[in-house]
Image (tube, grey):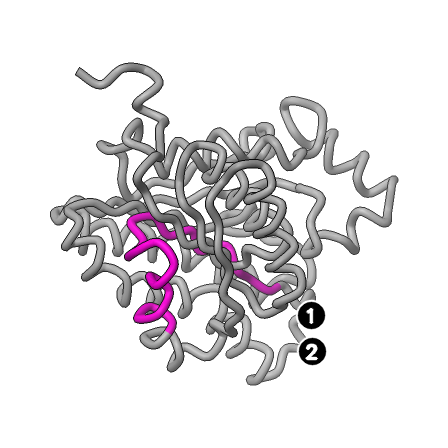
Amino acid sequence: MIGPRDLFDLGGSVALVTGGSSGLGRRIGFALARAGAAVVLLARRADKLEAARDEITEAGGRAACMAADIEDTAALEGIAATVGQAFGAPDILVNAAGVNLREPASDVTIDSWNRTLALNLGAPFFLSRALVPGMRQKGRGKIVNIASLQSCRAFANGIAYGASKGGIVQLTRAMAEAWSRFGITCNALAPGFFPTELTAPLYGDEAMLQRLAAQTAIGRNGELGDIDGPAIFLAAPASDYITGQVIFVDGGFTAK
């Protein structure tokens, strides 16, 4: 019988976290490492990746990093082929990389639309698909996508971002349908407002932050530590019978 601690033990697992150089991706990488996983952080900025990796290893965790641009979906097969060099093939994938260009509908171009959907929606699917064979060989896999409040709410200047995050909810269900029978579950976290690079424009407006906090049921915006438990849960054996679901980590923003 699996004990309560074992349900959340990631020892022996290998996790790949995209967007791992900053924000929620970086925080999730740290959380998975503390739970026992060997973590590979992937993003574009090598200096920030190396700093994050070093912080994990200095705390006693196992971490490596890989600088790559996953917006280029044609490169994802190659990334999947090399990412296992550090610790072996990943059995946990967190698709945390993303972009929000915050353009009014009238300013959205074909290029900005395509960039948003390629990174926020295309990369999670094609990278996941490239890693599924390795997960099937291990007989287990956990894929965690990052949804958003904009998966179900419309915000100003977010038409392309909202479309991509609405799509990630259905993509999560479709990936669960395709791969769960092989022991590979797929779920998503939908964060509320957290202090990250992506939300930096909001965090410069104290009045706006207070209004957003007042829209939650809890009465405050998110702190980075609030993402740790849900991320570990979806990566751990505790969630083995959960797939195709979205957990809103938003302090009750969508409940009101």
**Which amino acid does the dot numbered 1 rest on?**
Glu
**Which amino acid does the dot numbered 2 rest on?**
Asp
The verdict on residue 98 being magenta is yes
Task: Check disc 2 and report the residue beneath it.
Answer: 107
Front-most of 45 and 218? 45
Q: Residues within 10 Å of mark 1 (few under 14, many from 20)?
A: some
Q: Residue at x 46, y 73 (%)?
A: 118
Using residue 246 as the reference point, say whether residue 54 is left or right of it.
Answer: right
Please give the range of residues in magenta. Answer: 79-99
**SS of the residue under disc 2:** helix
- Residue 235 figure quarter: top left
Q: Residue at x 65, y 55 (%)?
A: 51
Q: Residue at x 55, y 50 (%)?
A: 25
Task: Check disc 1 and report the residue beneath it.
Answer: 103
Which quadrant, please, contains the N terminus?
Answer: top left
Q: Which mark is residue 256?
A: none
Using residue 236 as the reference point, say whether residue 102 is left or right of it.
Answer: right
Residue 188, how many percent across, how many down? 41, 45
Residue 245, how many percent across, how many down? 34, 40
Q: CA distance from mark 2 to mark 1?
A: 6 Å
Q: Are marks 2 and 1 in contact (CB under 8 Å)?
A: yes
Residue 240, how many percent across, how many down? 24, 33
